[in-house]
């Protein structure tokens, strides 16, 4: 592109104008999405899983499933399982302690 001619300068400015326009459109879309997320109450929060889901995950992990398989089985992402791993492991420990305190009668 030859920017020493009038047509070259115009074309150069035209490309710059479209680049600036696209940058502004991206910024507006991002702000709109963040505002919508705030309205839904999901902005800045980690995905949560229910206590029942954590119990199911603990049961599956105790049966020998790995964390990826546990995540697929309970229907959450691998990241979510890893985020809640310490709480799930605490549930497993609590279950073991409860079984020691209150042993099940054998038939």
Image (tube, grey):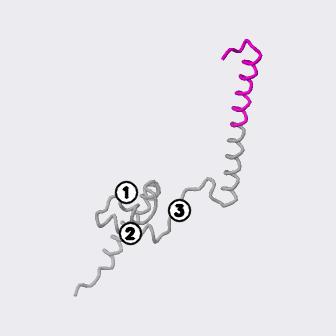
Real-space CA distance between mark 1 and mark 2, rounded to the nearest whole angstrom: 23 Å
Residue 68 numbered tag: 1
Residue 74 position in % (x across, y down) = 42, 66
Residue 77 numbered tag: none
Secondary structure found at label 2: helix
Residue 58 position in % (x across, y down) = 37, 66
Outermost residue to the left: 107
Real-space CA distance between mark 3 and mark 2, rounded to the nearest whole angstrom: 21 Å
Residue 48 numbered tag: 3
Left or right, 96 with respect to 6, comes to: left
Is 51 covered by the magenta stretch?
no
Q: Which residue is drawn at 26% across and 85% down?
A: 105
Residue 65 position in % (x across, y down) = 31, 62
Real-space CA distance between mark 3 and mark 1, rounded to the nearest whole angstrom: 17 Å
Residue 94 numbered tag: 2
Question: Mark 3, mark 1: which one is toward the viewer?
Answer: 1
Secondary structure found at label 3: loop
Left or right, 78 with respect to 6, comes to: left
Magenta region, residue range: 1-22
Q: Residue at x 33, y 70 (%)?
A: 96
């Amino acid at each position: 592109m030859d920017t020493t001619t009038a047509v070259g300068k115009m074309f150069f400015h035209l490309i710059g104008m479209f680049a600036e326009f696209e940058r502004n459109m991206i910024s507006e879309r991002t702000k709109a999405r963040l505002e919508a997320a705030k309205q839904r109450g999901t902005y800045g929060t980690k995905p949560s899983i229910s206590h029942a889901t954590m119990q199911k995950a603990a049961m599956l992990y105790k049966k020998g499933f790995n964390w990826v398989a546990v995540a697929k089985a309970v229907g959450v992402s691998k990241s979510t399982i890893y985020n809640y791993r310490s709480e799930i492991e605490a549930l497993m420990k609590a279950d073991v302690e409860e079984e020691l305190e209150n042993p099940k009668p054998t038939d």
